[in-house]
Amino acid sequence: MRCARAARSWWRATVAKDWRTDKYLQKLEAFLIVSDGAELYVITGAGDVLEPEHGVAAIGSGGMYALAAARALMDGPLPAEEIARRAMAIAADICVYTNGNLTVEKIGG
């Protein structure tokens, strides 16, 4: 189990290392949500890797609203993309700084 988990999570260390050492990424003050489909992480502008609680992550000005909405929707039979879209729509209705336009990028399947 330990070896399989380490093999799956090599990308987490690689992305964090690149963020800390890359000439342009070092100056980027942003957060990035990354996932391999099994695990979910938030990478900070300093290159720190954080594992969110409850398997849900949100960033940005309306992030806490989106996080609350996503956690409420997690109990239903909805797929991850639909949860993300609905949570962002709720956040956009609550927070004037949250844009309602959403682009979802899927890797694979």
Image: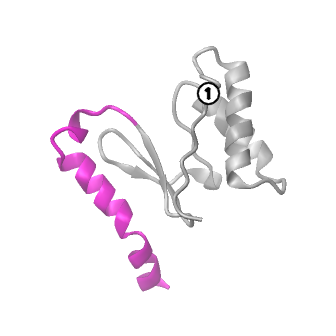
Display colour scheme: one colour
Q: Is residue 72 above or below residue 40?
A: above
User: 54 or 9: which is nearer to us?
Assistant: 9
Mark 1, residues whose alpha carbon is within 10 Å: few (<14), some, or many (≥20)?
few
Coordinates of residue 82 in the picture (x, y in percent): 73, 46
Residue drawn at 82 percent across, 53 percent down: 75
Q: Is residue 59 above or below residue 108?
A: above
| Magenta span | 1-30
How would you classify the magenta stretch by its main secondary structure? helix
Quadrant of the frame with the C terminus: bottom right
**Residue 66 lies in quadrant:** top right
Residue 59 appears left or right of 96: left
User: Tag 1: residue type?
Assistant: Asn
- Circle 1 sits in a helix, a strand or a loop, which is it? loop
Residue drawn at 50 percent across, 85 percent down: 1
Residue under circle 1?
101
Residue 34 appears left or right of 86: left
